[in-house]
Image (tube, grey):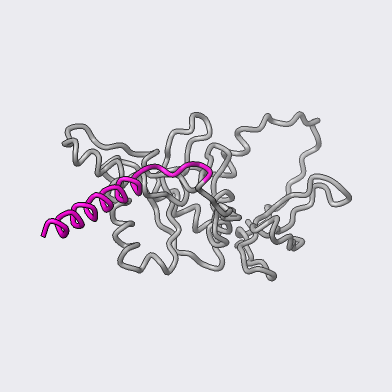
Amino acid sequence: MNILIIVAVIVIILAVLTALKAKQPAKVGELAFDSRDTLFSPAERSFLGVLEQSLDSRFRVFGKVRLGDLVKPAKGLSNSKRTTALNKSNQKHLDFVICSAADLAVIGVVELDDQSHGREDRAGRDAFVDQALATAKIPIVHFSAKRTYAIQDVRATLNESLKLAFNPVASDMSMQAPPTVQPVQQTKVDPLPAKPEEAAPVCPKCASVMVKRQAKNGSHAGDWFWACSAYPKCRQVIAL
């Protein structure tokens, strides 16, 4: 009987020592990591290009921002609830955050929802994020992932949901100094009908959404063209 008691005590001691060792932080030399290669998925990178085209120079877009960097536990919570709120908010990341270019004040959050958001675990995550931002009075807008987007539709949704209330063309022009021109003889010309904004095409090589770029150098300097948003992985271009 005494032998069994001694064996049981030894087993308990070994179990306790093993548990304590598991809780000890691993040394730097014991850890190893692999690169994720890219910060965004192809769908997120494509939508980022669309999002940047939909905003004017008064705004900046940041990606993969931690929810805990935007919100903090409200005053009056108990210590346990405060710790729970802090841990949950620090474990969630937001797809895109739109800030004011002047002072980087948060304007709103943009989430890109693919098919995975229909899963129960993702739905619970989305509900928590939406509720956290709502209590912090930070607006959020959800876009469904698509193969192609119309810039004017994205811009209209941002205007309505985030209350941006801006005219991108007028805003950009107002920030530029008026050019000096010589007076010329005015001639009455019938105005041309406004050309509807062209929707961003899909890259024929990798199916990413393309973004409009302007050549800075070379024989085509000043010319506009469509470039794949997955650059530099994909270097496909289409002339306008």
Assign the magenta stretch its main secondary structure.
helix
Where is 235 relative to 86, above or below?
below
Where is 20 relative to 194, above or below?
above
Tell whether 38 sits left or right of 115. Answer: right
Bounds of the magenta segment: 1-29
Look at the image and tell me in which quarter the C terminus lies: bottom right
Give x and y (percent) for residue 101: 53, 34
Tell whether 124 sits left or right of 202. Answer: left
Count of residue discs: 0
Residue 103 visible somewhere in the drawing: yes
**Nearer-the-camera pick, 71 or 60:** 71
Look at the image and tell me in which quarter the N terminus lies: bottom left
**Nearer-the-camera pick, 144 or 206:** 206
Residue 17 inside the magenta-drawn segment: yes
Q: Residue at x 78, y 31 (%)?
A: 181
Image-quadrant location for residue 73: top left
Residue extending farthest to the front is 2
Q: Residue at x 68, y 56 (%)?
A: 231
Residue 133 visible somewhere in the drawing: no
Give x and y (percent) for residue 219: 89, 50
Give x and y (percent) for residue 11: 24, 55
